[in-house]
Image: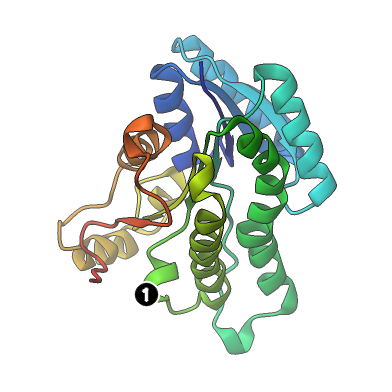
């Protein structure tokens, strides 16, 4: 049985990824922010009541040593990590001229630095075993930019630069590294937006709706499989046609 670690696993997209992976025979560990222990436990119980078994580990992905402890605990629970999904992310939106250093640093640390902190803990084991799947969840805004999100857009664009470089380093070792860039996805966070904002978002998407978390999860599941072994260094957009590039 292959093992998978999903950072931000109890979030909207992370939850769908954990569920899909668990239902398709993976041994899944969801990593949550250590200050949200009770919420994570409640989330785990809810899945268990639905017949979905997912382990949980707490930590702070912005801190290297905390990330190491988190991964060590995950390995103790399910064994060496075969698939890593870097899904942890936050927003701290503001126009650039009003953006304070904390807003910049928190987003860069959580959305970009974390990918180094966590991936560095699993890469040697993947190289030794000759198999690995690293899947980084970026965003359409890392491709096209977004007003009021210089921090978020920069972090997500940097994530794909990381993907392409690491893909080249590991391609001959049985490891693939890819990016998935969602557009606007229907999660509790987006559904809390005012109706007029949601309507404007949907109106800007060519397919005429928001995406579902499960649509991201299905792509992650494919990238984690043996069937995608010839795909590495790719950025797969799932945005309903909101941004198209050759």
Relative side of 214 to 122, left or right: left
Spot occupied by residue 8 in the image (x, y as percentages of width and height):
59, 42
* Residue found 57% across the figure and 67% down from its top: 155
Secondary structure category for the residue under label 1? helix
Relative side of 182 to 73, left or right: left
For the C terminus, the quadrant is bottom left
Say which residue label 1 marks: 144
* Other-residue count near label 1 (Cα within 10 Å), few / some / many at <14 / 14–19 / ≥20: few
In this view, which residue lies farthest toward the front? 172
Res 116 quadrant in image = bottom right
Chosen colour scheme? rainbow
Question: In terms of depth relative to the viewer, which is nearer, 195 or 212?
Answer: 212
In this view, which residue lies farthest toward the bottom? 97
Q: Is residue 127 above or below residue 107?
A: above
In this view, which residue lies farthest toward the right? 65
Spot occupied by residue 180 in the image (x, y as percentages of width and height):
40, 52
Relative side of 167 to 114, left or right: left
Q: Is residue 214 above or below residue 167?
A: above
Spot occupied by residue 137 in the image (x, y as percentages of width and height):
47, 51
Q: What is the count of numbered marks? A: 1
Q: Is residue 66 above or below residue 139?
A: above
* Residue found 75% across the figure and 20% down from its top: 76
* Residue found 44% across the figure and 43% down from its top: 188
Q: Is residue 146 visible?
A: yes
Relative side of 216 to 174, left or right: left
Spot occupied by residue 52 in the image (x, y as percentages of width and height):
47, 15
Q: Is residue 135 visible?
A: no
Q: Is residue 219 above or below residue 196?
A: above
* Residue found 33% across the figure and 64% down from its top: 197
């Amino acid at each position: 049985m292959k093992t998978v670690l999903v950072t931000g696993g109890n979030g909207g997209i992370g939850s769908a990824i954990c569920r899909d992976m668990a239902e398709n025979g993976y041994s899944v560990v969801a990593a949550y922010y250590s200050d949200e222990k009770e919420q994570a436990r409640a989330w785990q119980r809810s899945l268990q009541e639905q017949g979905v078994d997912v382990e949980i580990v707490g930590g702070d992905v912005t801190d290297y040593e905390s990330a190491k402890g988190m991964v060590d605990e995950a390995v103790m629970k399910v064994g060496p990590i075969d698939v890593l999904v870097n899904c942890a992310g936050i927003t701290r939106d503001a126009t650039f001229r009003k953006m304070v250093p904390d807003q910049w640093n928190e987003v860069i640390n959580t959305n970009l630095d974390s990918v180094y902190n966590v991936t560095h803990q699993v890469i040697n084991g993947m190289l030794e075993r000759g198999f690995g799947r690293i899947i980084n969840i970026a965003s359409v805004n890392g491709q096209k930019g977004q007003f009021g999100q210089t921090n978020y857009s920069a972090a997500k664009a940097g994530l794909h630069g990381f993907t392409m470089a690491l893909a080249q380093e590991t391609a001959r070792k049985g490891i693939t590294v890819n990016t998935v860039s969602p557009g606007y996805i229907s999660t509790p966070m987006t559904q809390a937006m005012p109706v007029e904002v949601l309507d404007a978002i949907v109106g800007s998407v060519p397919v005429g709706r928001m995406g579902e978390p499960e649509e991201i999860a299905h792509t992650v599941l494919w990238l984690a499989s043996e069937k995608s072994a010839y795909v590495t260094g790719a950025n797969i957009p799932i945005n309903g046609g909101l941004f198209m590039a050759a």
